[in-house]
Image (cartoon, rainbow, N blue to C red):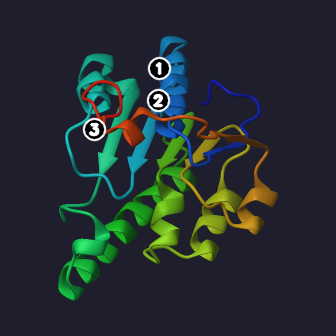
Amino acid sequence: MSNLKEGYIQIYTGNGKGKTTAAMGLAIRAVGDGMKVYVIQFLKSGKTGELKISEILGENFKIFRFETTKGFTWNLNEEQLSKLKEEVNEGYNFALKILENKECDILILDEVMAAMKGEFLTEEQVLKLMNIKPKDMELILTGRNVPEKIADKADLITEMKEIKHYYKAGVNARKGIEF
């Protein structure tokens, strides 16, 4: 039985920092209130702080990744891209199963917009996930470049807008801050 009476569809998007961070903050808050949160991270395979915190938070907070392919998509050869597409679709099928079986209170699809932008998932696939979301489950999507039909289906959209970023001054991504 869900801890939510009514679940909504939220999107965190924009060219600024903080989309995944916002989703993880919500996840930690929800787990603190006894909810079960599942996160499927698309196009992420490196070590991140959220993987470590999932071990601490236990059974109510699980992160799932399906990609074994390493590196930026623009550096991958055709065979690697094909393998990555298979892995992303494995994650998609897992998301379908979670939604169909109502396995959690909140499902976060981290960087699902990037999976669409890279043509690993279709807009129709993501719309299907949104359409089959149980009434009492929250669905959170993150990533840049939200297609119009997906934006129309969402209940809440927050845009992270970059105004200034230290990356432009030569500061690389920092452990515990950006990953």
Please report the residue visible at 47 percent of the width from the left and 53 percent of the height from the top.
111
Could one spot residue 96 in this view of the protein?
Answer: no
Residue under pointer 2: 24
- Closer mark to the observer between disc 3 and disc 2: 3
Labelled disc at residue 28: 1
Quadrant where the C terminus lies? top left
Residue under pointer 3: 172
Q: Secondary structure at mark 2?
A: helix
Which mark sits nearer the N-terminus, 3 or 1? Answer: 1
Are the two marked residues, 1 and 2, in contact with CB atoms closer than 8 angstroms? yes
On the image, the x and y values in percent for residue 165 come to: 48, 35
Does 131 appear above or below 99?
below
- Closer mark to the observer between disc 3 and disc 1: 3
On the image, the x and y values in percent for residue 43 come to: 34, 58
Does 90 appear above or below 7?
below
State the CA–CA distance, disc 1 to disc 2: 6 Å
Please report the residue visible at 48 percent of the width from the left and 73 percent of the height from the top.
121
Could one spot residue 59 in this view of the protein?
Answer: yes
Which mark sits nearer the N-terminus, 3 or 2? Answer: 2
Question: Which residue is at the front of the view, 145 or 38?
Answer: 145
Q: Answer left or right for 34 relative to 131.
A: left
Does 35 appear above or below 108?
above
Q: Secondary structure at mark 1?
A: helix
Question: Which residue is at the front of the view, 88 or 147?
Answer: 147
Are the two marked residues, 3 and 1, in contact with CB atoms closer than 8 angstroms? no
Q: Quadrant of residue 163?
A: top right
State the CA–CA distance, disc 3 to disc 2: 21 Å
Number of residues whose C-alpha sits closer than 10 Å to that of mark 1, classed few (under 14), some (14–19) or many (20 or more):
many
